[in-house]
């Protein structure tokens, strides 16, 4: 059975291990060096403070981490504070199992409850699994930056999609 729960710094090593193959073997992320467990612990703490970082855990003590999803600032300027970037990463071999959808559903609910109005996702192309996941979650494609990132000796495009978190059109309340 898989449990989705808030991440803690104790999950940092497992999250770093999940992320490392995306860094070293794909252009899905434009990072070129896998972050250490300490780096990942800092990211988890920063995200949990203002947004959310969730893990999918298995095992009798929910201690085997098989995926994670998080929200982060969209941009630093104050007018953007009701928007956030979201990402999900799964252990190799766990794609197209419903796990990404489950992590995102919980993440998006938590972000909306905190007062965020828009979730934004960037997807390095091609990535049919991620494109399909975001489409299934209701994200709308809003544009593509062409040849925006250089990794593995080639240029890569990044598509951006967004999702409204709630239907309110009036003034926002401050994010909790």
Image (cartoon, helix red, strand yellow):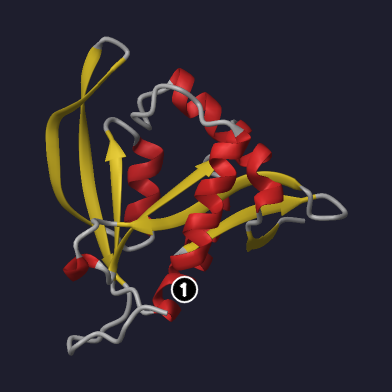
Q: Quadrant of residue 173?
A: bottom left
Instruction: Give the residue at x 50% y 63%.
Output: 52
Instruction: Give the residue at x 51% y 53%.
Output: 69
> Going by the image, does 66 lie left or right of 127?
right
Residue 147 coordinates in the image, percent (x, y): 14, 26
Residue 129 coordinates in the image, percent (x, y): 41, 39
- Viewer-proximal residue among 107 and 81: 81
Q: Residue furthest bottom?
A: 170
Query: Tag 1, which secondary structure?
Result: helix
Q: Is residue 33 above or below residue 60?
A: above
Quadrant of the image containing the C terminus: bottom left
> Going by the image, does 133 lie left or right of 92?
left
Q: What residue sits right under mark 1 in the picture?
A: 109
Instruction: Give the residue at x 61% y 41%.
Output: 15
Quadrant of the image containing the N terminus: bottom right
Q: Quadrant of residue 94?
A: top right
Residue 166 coordinates in the image, percent (x, y): 31, 80
Label 1 neighbour load within 10 Å: few <14, some 14-19, many 20+: few
User: In this view of the protein, can residue 74 be seen by the observer?
Assistant: yes
Q: Is residue 51 above or below residue 98?
A: below
> Going by the image, does 10 lie left or right of 106?
right
- Viewer-proximal residue among 143 and 73: 73
Residue 77 coordinates in the image, percent (x, y): 19, 61
User: In this view of the protein, can residue 93 be seen by the observer?
Assistant: no
């Amino acid at each position: 059975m898989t449990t989705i729960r808030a991440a803690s710094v104790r999950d940092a090593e497992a999250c770093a291990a999940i992320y490392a193959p995306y860094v070293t073997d794909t252009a899905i992320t434009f990072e070129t060096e896998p972050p250490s467990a300490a780096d990942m612990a800092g990211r988890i703490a920063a995200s949990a403070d203002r947004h959310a970082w969730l893990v999918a855990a298995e095992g009798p003590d929910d201690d085997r981490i098989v995926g994670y999803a998080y929200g982060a600032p969209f941009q630093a300027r104050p007018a953007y504070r009701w928007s956030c970037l979201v990402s999900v990463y799964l252990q190799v071999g766990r794609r197209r199992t419903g796990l990404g959808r489950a992590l995102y559903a919980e993440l998006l609910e938590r972000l909306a409850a905190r007062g965020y109005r828009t979730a934004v996702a960037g997807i390095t192309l091609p990535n049919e699994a991620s494109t399909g996941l975001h489409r299934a979650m209701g994200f709308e494609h809003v544009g593509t930056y062409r040849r925006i990132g250089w990794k593995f000796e080639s240029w890569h495009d990044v598509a951006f999609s967004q999702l409204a978190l709630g239907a309110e059109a009036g003034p926002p309340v401050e994010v909790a």
